[in-house]
Amino acid sequence: MDESRAVIERLERIEALDRAGASADELVPELRALLEEAAAWSRTEGGDAAVRAVEDLQSALGRDMIDV
């Protein structure tokens, strides 16, 4: 349950930063941390769908359009 709480807290932080008009330089590290926390969560509680979702996020964060 700690993993799921970490993901929820990170999402709340990202939403707050976004609402405050945070720059990509501020948001991308938070998104990367979210990815790590989501991976931990999927290893503990997820199934195949969770693993695929984490892989999709990793792929998206690896693209030049997101990489800052």
Image (spheres, grey):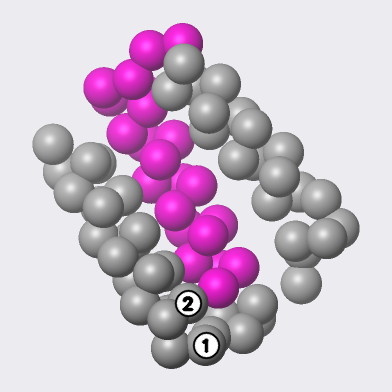
Q: Position of residue 58 (x, y in %)?
A: 64, 40
- Residue 48 versus residue 22 in the image, above or below: above
Quarter of the picture containing the C terminus is: bottom right
Q: Residues within 10 Å of mark 1 (few under 14, many from 20)?
A: few
In the visual, does 50 lie left or right of 45?
A: right
Magenta segment: 27-48
Mark 2, secondary structure of its residue = helix
- Residue 11 versus residue 40 in the image, above or below: below
Looking at the rendered structure, the kind of residue marked 1 is: Gly
In the visual, does 20 lie left or right of 65?
A: left
In the visual, does 27 lie left or right of 37?
A: right
Q: Position of residue 42 (x, y in %)?
A: 37, 27
Q: Residue furthest top?
A: 48
Q: Residues within 10 Å of mark 2 (few under 14, many from 20)?
A: some
The answer to the question of whether label 2 and label 1 lie on touching residues, with beta carbons closer than 8 A, is yes
- Reading the image, the residue beneath label 2 is 18
